[in-house]
Amino acid sequence: MKETSVLCLLFLISLLSCTTNQAGLTVSPSSSQFFEGDFVSLSCEEDDSSAGWTLRRNTSKQQRTQCGDVWGEGAGSSCNISYTDQYDSGVYWCESREGPISNMVNLTVTGGSVILQSPVLPVMEGDDVTLLCKTKTTPSNLPAAFYKDGSLIRKQPTGHMTIQHVSRSDEGLYKCDISGHGESPSSWITVTDKHTTTPPPTSTSPPVFTSITLLPSVSPPVLSVLSCVGSVCVVVLLVLLVLLVRRCVHRKPEADQEETGEDDIITHVMYSFIKSSTTASQTKQRR
C-alpha cells in the first residue's frame, strides 16, 4: 500500500509540474516581403534552450525541411538566408524535438520591383501600424497607392501609410502599387486583442504550403485549430488526473479491509490457542 501511494504521488507531481516549452519566431528585417537577393535572418526566441528548437519551413517545392539541410545557414535556433530566391517563399516556424511548434510566419520573396513592408507578426489592437511601399531601386519614397482586400484605401505622396489605433476591422490582405514600377505581392495583416495571449504550441503539424497568394488568408483559421487542439489536450489530462485520484482513494479502503481480515484471523488463532491451553490445564487438575 505504501509503495502504491508513493507511485501515485510521484505521478501527480509529474503532471502538475509539466510545462510546455515555448518559442517565438522573429524575422530580421521585420517584414513579410523581400526582394530577390535580400538577406534574411530568422531566430527562435526560446523559453528553454534545452528543448532543442530548430527552424523548419514549407514551400511550394518542399515540405518540413530544416535549416541547413537544403536551405539557409545556421546552427541550433538561428538561421540566415544570405541570398533570397522566389523559392524561399513559404511558411516558417520553430519546432522542438519534443514536438511543440512556435508561431508560423509567411514570407514572400518576389522577383518584381515593388514590395510592401508590413508587420510580419500580429499587431495588437490600439497600436499604430506603418506600411511602406518600397522599390528595389532608389529612390524608394515614391508616391504609392495602398489597397486592402482589393479596394483602394488611399494614395500617399511619399510611399508611407500609417494606420492609427488599429482594430479588428483593419485585419486583411494588403498590397501597394507605384506607378511606372509595378504592384507588390499581397500580405495578410493580423490584429489581435489586447487581452489575448498567444496560444500554447502543440504538436500539430504546420499546414502544407499550397499557394503564396492564398496562404495569408488561411493562416488565422490554422491558429484557431491549434488552439482548440491544445484545449482538448488539457481536458484529457484533467480527466486522467481525476481517474487516477479516484483509483488511489479506492485502493486504501480495500487495503484496510485486507489488513482487518488478517487481524481477525490472527485474533481467532490466538483465542483458539488460549482456549485449548485452558481446557488442557483444567483436565489435569481434575485428574
Image: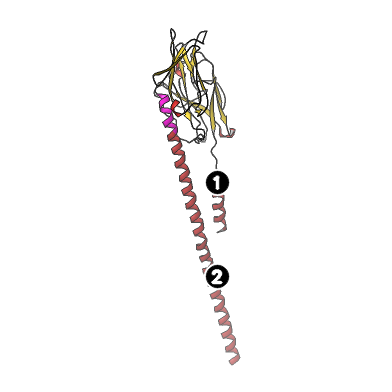
Q: CA distance from mark 1 to mark 2?
A: 38 Å
Above or below for 179 versus 168? above
Instruction: Categorize mark 1 by other alpha carbons within 10 Å: few (<14), some (14-19), many (20+).
Output: few
- The quarter of the displayed image where residue 154 is located: top left
Residue at 43% x, 30% y: name it: 220
Which image quarter holds the N terminus?
A: bottom right
On screen, residue 79 above or below 6: above
Helix, strand or loop at disc 2?
Answer: helix
At label 2, counting other C-alpha atoms closer than 10 Å, the crowd grade (few under 14, some 14-19, many 20 or more) is: few
Q: Residue 74 appears at what percent x and percent y?
A: 56, 22
Q: Amino acid at mark 1?
A: Leu
Whether residue 287 is visible to the viewer of this picture, yes or no, is: no
Give whichever of 6, 124 is nearer the camera. Answer: 124
Q: Residue at x 55, y 55 (%)?
A: 5
Query: Residue drawn at (60%, 86%), measured in percent from left and top?
Result: 281
Residue 220 visible to the viewer: yes
- The residue segment tinted magenta is 214-223
Please identify the dominant SS of the magenta region. helix
Write the residue at 56% across / 34% down.
Answer: 51
Q: Which residue is mark 2?
A: 263
Kindly give the residue lying farthest to the bottom in the view shown: 287
Marker disc for residue 16 = 1
Which label lies toward us, 1 or 2? 1
**Towards the viewer: 166 or 121:** 166
